[in-house]
Every structure is written in C-alpha cells, then in structure tokens.
Amino acid sequence: MYIIPAIDILDGKVVRLREGDYNQKTEYDVSIAEMIEKYRSNGTDFIHIIDLNGAKGDFSNQKSLFEIIKKTEMKVQYGGGIRTIEQVTNLLDAGIHRVIVGTQAITNPDFLQQLSEAFAKKDNYANRIVIAIDVLDEVIKYSGWMESSPIKLMDYVDKCLALGFFRFLCTDISKDGKLGGAAIELYKKLLEHSPMIKLIASGGVSSMEDIDELAKYPIRSVVVGKAIYEDRITIEEIKEWNLKALSSI
C-alpha cells in the first residue's frame, strides 16, 4: 500500500476541511508551490491535489495551479470539478498522471459510458481515471459533498466496473479531517463486494498506526493530508514506508 500526500486548495490557499464542510476549514501558512517542493525535496514522487473551488464549479484557481503543477516532475492525481470528456482528455494529455471524476459521473447517467467509449482505444487511459466515491453513512455525496445521490453504493461500484473503471478513491466524510482513524469497515465492505477494485483510501488517517491497520487489507494506496500538516505523520516516515511498499511490489 502506497501513501499519497494530499494538498487541498481553496481560494488559492492550502487548507483542510472537517467532514467536507467548507465552513469548517483550517488554513495553513504555506503556499501551494512551497508544499509541493517540500514533498518533492523529501523524495515524494506522487501527490494528490484537489481544487475545492473547482468542486463547486469555480475554476479561479486553475490557471495558477496548473502553472505550478507543470513545473513539477512528480506524478499528480488531480480532481475538482471535472465535468467533460474534453477536460479529462486534456488533463491526461497534459501529463496529469491520474484524473479524478466524481459529481459528473454520478449526476449524468451517460457520462461514464461516454468516458469509457472515449478511452476504449487509448492504451492504459482507463487506469489513469479515478472514480471518486464520497460516502456519508453509505450514502454517496457529490458537488463538494453538499448533495446526496439515490444510487446505492455497491450498485454504483458495479456500474463503474462494467464500464471498465476499476480505480476508486473512497472517502468516508464522517472521518475526513477529524484524525479519528480510517473507515476500515467501509473499505472491508467494498473489497468483499468487489475484490478486483484498486481502492484508494481517504479520510481520518491520524498516525502511522492507522497506516499499519489499513495495510492489513488489499488497499492499493491511501491519501494522507491533515496528519501531515499537524505533524502527526512526517514526510520522512512516508518516504520510508513508500520505499518498502515499492520494494515489495
């Protein structure tokens, strides 16, 4: 299991939200570029960047954000307001390693079908698309976690798999930003239902002990944010863990 450090952006600042609530944000006194460089200089080669404004349809961060991303050699997993096939294609062609799709895949019944067809003949592109599943009490949430979907969680997973998408980023909103431990039971249910999925865990990780617990299950990677900013997990610990993870693949 690989650890992917997270950077969440809101109004051009590095932040973390509590339970997905934009009114419960913590701002950190570090710029986006400084945070990316901090990760890079300490040997991190993969980062997770979410544009929280973009998730609500406001793309005011994108120009400056992408100027910074273009300058890094790290692999970037990026999400926030991806609404069209063209956006996905442009991001992948521009060098974004993985693109996260969430709201549009849930609210537009044809989007995933169109996405599947668009990338059917492009080698390895489906592997570079991540389906975001943001969950509160097993209800799927979208639009920056402000809306609820009637689609049942496991039905949605089955639909995505049938269309060729198998990499999922699952966030338990009740855990996110609270440093209270990861949603182990939710991940166990998902993996028992669909053992073939490539699961990325997100939310609640507070320590390396939480990482050890997640690693007991076939979870491919875990996104860690607030625990880094609050100095509960060091970048050096992440580097050491990831070196061991890579050597065991």
Image: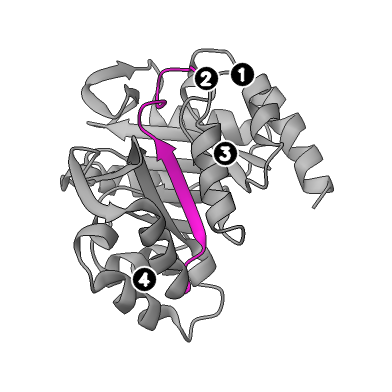
Q: Position of residue 195 (x, y in %)?
A: 61, 57
Relative to 161, 51 lies left or right: left
Q: Comparing marks 2 and 4, which lies closer to the viewer?
A: 2
Q: State how far apart marks 2 and 4 are (Cα).
A: 33 Å
Q: Which residue is mark 3?
A: 222
Residue 207, numbered circle: 1
N-terminal of the pair, mark 2 or mark 1, is: 1
Q: State how far apart marks 3 and 1 are (Cα).
A: 12 Å
Q: Residue at x 32, y 17 (%)?
A: 27
Q: State how far apart marks 3 and 4 are (Cα).
A: 25 Å
Q: Amino acid at mark 3?
A: Val
Q: Position of residue 213 (x, y in %)?
A: 67, 29
Q: Comparing marks 2 and 1, which lies closer to the viewer?
A: 1
Q: Amino acid at mark 4?
A: Thr
Q: Position of residue 167 (x, y in %)?
A: 51, 58
Instruction: Inspect the magenta stretch and tell me whether residue 168 lies in it.
Output: yes
Q: Secondary structure at mark 2?
A: helix
* Proximity of marks 4 and 1: CB atoms separated by less than 8 Å: no
Q: Residue at x 39, y 51 (%)?
A: 132
